[in-house]
Amino acid sequence: MAEHRHDRISIDPRIAAGKPVVRSTRLPVERVLQHLAQRDRSDLFEAFPELTEDDVRACLDYAREAVERLHPARPNPTAA
């Protein structure tokens, strides 16, 4: 089984003001997401050579799960 992606994200109040960061770095998940939103993904690894594909997937999963926690899916009463 693949490594749980949350193992790649850490939160420490002493690092990045407690924001989630990519494990073993001081790179906030937020910064990775901003880069992906504003630039071509192809230069992501040039900008942050310490990142791996799995780190990027973990950042995206973390963001998705954060949105799901803030806005949980509600059952559709008309669905059968």
Image (cartoon, grey):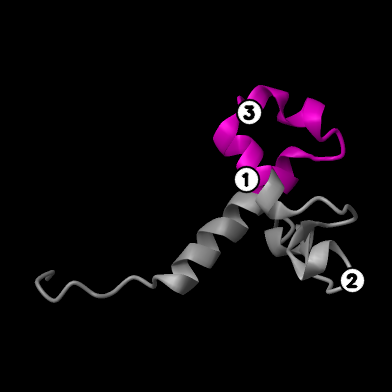
Residue that label 1 marks: 33
Q: Nearer the viewer, residue 29 or 74?
A: 29
- Image quarter hosting the N terminus: bottom right
Q: Earlier in the sequence, mark 1 or mark 2?
A: 2
Q: Position of residue 54 (x, y in %)?
A: 72, 45
Foreground: disc 2 or disc 3:
2
Q: Is residue 2 above or below residue 39?
A: below
- Image quarter hosting the C terminus: bottom left
Alpha carbons under labels 1 and 2: distance apart: 21 Å
Q: Which mark is residue 14?
A: 2
Q: Earlier in the sequence, mark 1 or mark 3?
A: 1
Picture residue at 80% right of the left edge, 67% below the top:
17
Q: Main secondary structure of the magenta part?
A: helix
Foreground: disc 1 or disc 2:
2
Picture residue at 86% right of the left edge, 54% below the top:
26
**Residue 76 lies in quadrant:** bottom left
Alpha carbons under labels 1 and 3: distance apart: 10 Å
Q: Is residue 34 left or right of residue 43?
A: left
